[in-house]
Image (cartoon, rainbow, N blue to C red):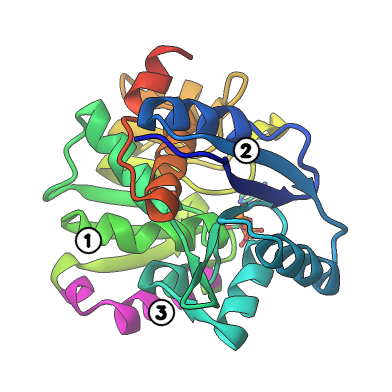
Amino acid sequence: MSQSSPQHFIVIGNPIAHSKSPEIHQQFATQAQLQICYNRQYCPNDTASFIAVVEAFFNGGGVGANVTVPFKQIAYQLCAERGQLSSHAQVAGAVNTLMLKKGKIYGDNTDGQGLVNHLLSLGWPLKGAKVAILGAGGASRGVALPLIEAGIKQLTIANRTVSKAQALIEQLCTASPIIDAIDPDYCALELLEGDFDIIINATSIGLSGDRLPLKDSLTCHYAYDMMYGRELPFLSHFTNKGAKVSSGYGMLIGQAALSFKLWTGASVDPSLLLHNQ
Ligand code: ATR
């Protein structure tokens, strides 16, 4: 496929200089033989500035925008008030992908499906799996529904503030008729115990160097940290207990591939980027 002028994309965030999205999407465009121009867009941290940036971009002919920290919830509000939301964005309460549909702003959330696709590409079994998610903030909300849809059998959400884990489980019960089939549960993070197939760290503790208060009796076959970068204490903890582990770089590429497909219609292979990492 060829085209005469490039399609324009941005990723909006604050800070944004570190974002790897332009390089990732450029590699997807090469795979799909499309010409694109994908830029990092800094935005002051307030709602009015975010809306102004989004309007200017789409009024100027932009095709698609990714949204990152701290704007995912503001993007959700914008789409809820003036446009449309996908079911995944509705449950997540957050939007990472913006585009126009019939002239109106449309928000989706590809984070959770990006995670699911990465787990499947690693060969980690999801069908029938007993899964625990640590954390009940935006990252956790974004991945819970896609994991349920991928066929897990049991989901426990464990959080430092247990009321937030309870609220998220209750929201999932309302949003998804299939959750009844999967035995949902919640508890305080420091009380989580037992043997899980997969434990996913969706807290923001990440690279801080701090350690989560995990019981020694908590074990798993596979441990996934949604963060990526230097050595993650969560992953070292479960490596020492004999689990297979992965950081979230593949999820980053996975969510990007899904955004790219929404915008351009082109399917790309995210695993090619992982091998070139
Ligand atoms: P994000 O969008 O990255 O999910 P968030 O919505 O602020 O960010 O949520 C952060 C999550 O990490 C929350 O579940 C938070 O627990 P609380 O709800 O109790 O605040 C969790 N978290 C952050 N720092 C933590 C720490 N030091 N120990 C345990 N949990 C932590």
Q: Are marks 1 and 3 in contact (CB under 8 Å)?
A: no
In the picture, measured across the screen, residue 157 lies left or right of residue 39, that is: left
Label disc, if present, on residue 163 of the rendered structure: none
Q: Which residues are magenta?
A: 164-180
Residue furthest to the right: 44
Q: Amino acid at mark 3?
A: Gln
Label tally: 3
Q: Which residue is mark 3?
A: 171
Q: Amino acid at mark 2?
A: Cys
Q: Are marks 2 and 1 in contact (CB under 8 Å)?
A: no
- Mark 1 / mark 3, whichever is N-terminal: 1
Label 2 and label 3: CA atoms lie apart by: 38 Å
Q: Could you tell me which residue is drawn at 54 percent across and 29 percent down? A: 26
Residue 42 colored in magenta in the image? no
**Quadrant where the image shows the N terminus:** top left
Q: Is residue 15 above or below residue 225?
A: below
Q: Which residue is mark 1?
A: 149
Q: Could you tell me which residue is drawn at 35 percent across and 20 percent down? A: 272
| Nearer the camera: disc 2 or disc 3 | 2
Residue 229 x/y as whole percent: 61, 24
Q: Could you tell me which residue is drawn at 33 percent across and 64 percent down? A: 145
Instruction: Using a 10 Å C-alpha cutoff, classify the residue at mark 2 as few (fewer than 14 neighbours), some (14 to 19) or many (20 or more).
Output: some
Q: Are marks 2 and 3 in contact (CB under 8 Å)?
A: no
The answer to which of 273 and 178 lies nearer the viewer is: 273
Q: Secondary structure at mark 2?
A: strand
- Assign ligand 1 to one image quadrant: bottom right
